[in-house]
Amino acid sequence: MKDGLGRRFLKRIARFCYTFDLKTTRFIWKAKGEPKFELKGYCNGCGICCESPMIQTNPIFFHLKSVRWMILTWHRVVNGFDYVGENKRFYTFSFRCTHWDSETKLCDSYESRPGLCRDYPRNLTYTVDPQFFEECSYYAVNKNAARLRKSLENQKLPPEKLAEIYEKLHLKE
Ligand code: SF4
Ligand code: SF4
């Protein structure tokens, strides 16, 4: 359902806090050499990332009933994300987005979409092993790819083995 004035207002405030938090955190991480990957490619509009949005929390938020309730309620009422499941190992919640139209592959409230939708898939460059959807035209390249490729080439490995390592370590430009 398309966002009304109230939701747009709440989402704008939430986005401001989210962006501030994200920029501050990433500024601190930058000093530690993060992210290790560069984001390459483009969005082809396949819409797969909207089919089942996921949110990762931390163990405390995930297990503490009151906080958990607040997170899920906020996402349902404000973001239009209906809870569909969770992953206890990674402390993630998965949702069905009520703004997503699977036929047109469009978001009915694109202008007021939450910060996490705007950040995807850049957030993946901050993970240890960025994994994109098969349909996605984005990919990650290790920032040290040129140096690593050079040292691997000196190892005289079989071409298929080399290609496999390139793939695993995100060394392909
Ligand atoms: S999965 Fe990738 S290419 Fe597809 S809509 Fe999302 S960001 Fe764009
Ligand atoms: S709010 Fe829009 S951009 Fe975000 S998951 Fe839903 S349909 Fe996709």
Image (cartoon, rainbow, N blue to C red):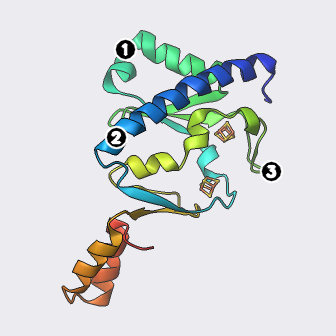
Q: Are marks 1 and 2 in contact (CB under 8 Å)?
A: no
Q: Position of residue 123 (x, y in %)?
A: 47, 45
**Distance from Cα at disc 2 to Cα at disc 3:** 38 Å
Q: Is residue 82 left or right of residue 143?
A: right
- At label 3, the amino acid type is Thr
Q: Is mark 1 within 8 Å of ligand 2?
A: no
Mark 2 vs mark 3, foreground winner is 2
Q: Which residue is mark 3?
A: 104
Splitting the image into 4 quarters, where does residue 44 fall?
A: bottom right
Q: Residue at x 35, y 55 (%)?
A: 36
Q: Secondary structure at mark 2?
A: helix
**Distance from Cα at disc 1 to Cα at disc 3:** 38 Å
Q: Could you tell me if residue 164 is visible in this image?
A: yes
- At label 2, the amino acid type is Trp
Q: Position of residue 80 (x, y in %)?
A: 67, 27
Q: Residues within 10 Å of mark 2 (few under 14, many from 20)?
A: few
Q: Position of residue 104 (x, y in %)?
A: 80, 50
